[in-house]
Amino acid sequence: MWSSCARSPLRSPLFSERFALAVEVDNGVAISSCRLNRATIANLAGRHDSAEELLAENLPFTRSRGQVTCETWTLALRAEVHARYHGRPEGVGGDALRASELALGVNDTPMLAYCLDLYAYSIAARGDAQSAVLILAATEAARDAMEVGADEDELAIRTPALELIGADVASSEAWAAGRALDLAAAVELARTIQLERPPA
C-alpha cells in the first residue's frame, strides 16, 4: 500500500526544493502529497512520532482545501501509525471509518478495503470479534473480485486482527456471510458499530 511512496523521486535531494516550490505557488495538492510522502518515509525509517506530526499537520490542511483523496490517505496513515507501530489499534476506529467513507465516496476500492481492514482491527481489539470477521471477509472478497491479494502492509493489519479473533474463521458461517457483503454494506455495518459501541 505505502512502499511505492518511499521509492518516489521525492526522496531525492530535490525533495525540499519541490516542497518549497509547492508552498511558494500555493499548490495545495502538492503540499499535501509531499507531507504524505515524508510521513511514509518516516514510518519506514522507524520515525513514527515524526510521521504522526506530519499527518497531524496535514489533516486540517486537506480539509480546508477540500482534498478528499489526500484527507483519506492522511486518515489511513494516521490510523496505521497508531495500530501498527504504536500498538493501539483499539483507538483508530474513528479515523479508519471516516477514511472508509471518503474512499467509498470517490470509488477507491483498494483504499476502501484497507481502511476497512484497519477498522476491523480496531473493533477486534475492542472485543467485537463477530463484526470484525464480517468486515475482514468482505474485504477479502473485494480483493478476490479485483484479482489481487493483500499486500505486505495490508497483511500487517489483517494478520494481527485475525490473531485477536483467535479462531479458524475462514470456514465459519460468519466468514461466508461477510464475503457476501459488498464494501458499501461493510461501511454501513461499521457506521452502526461506531454509533452503538464507540470507544471508551
Image: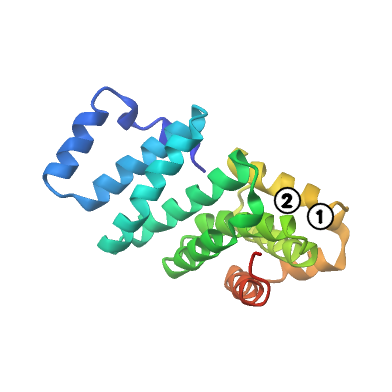
Q: Is residue 78 above or below residue 181?
A: above
Residue 4 visible within the image = no
Q: Is residue 69 above or below residue 7?
A: below
- Residue nearest the observer in this picture, 1 or 34: 34
Residue visible at 18% across and 49% down in the picture? 27
Label total for image: 2
Q: Residues within 10 Å of mark 1 (few under 14, many from 20)?
A: some
Left or right side of 37 for 1: right
Query: Gap in Å between the C-alphas at discs 1 and 2?
Result: 7 Å
Residue visible at 31% across and 40% down in the picture? 34
Q: Which mark is residue 165?
A: 1
Is disc 1 in contact with disc 2, using a CB cutoff of under 8 Å?
yes
Q: Position of residue 194 (x, y in %)?
A: 62, 71
Q: Position of residue 156 (x, y in %)?
A: 65, 41
Q: Position of residue 191 (x, y in %)?
A: 59, 74
Q: Would you name the residue on which mark 2 appears?
A: 161
Q: Amino acid at mark 2?
A: Ala
Left or right side of 58 for 196: right
Q: Position of residue 179 (x, y in %)?
A: 73, 65
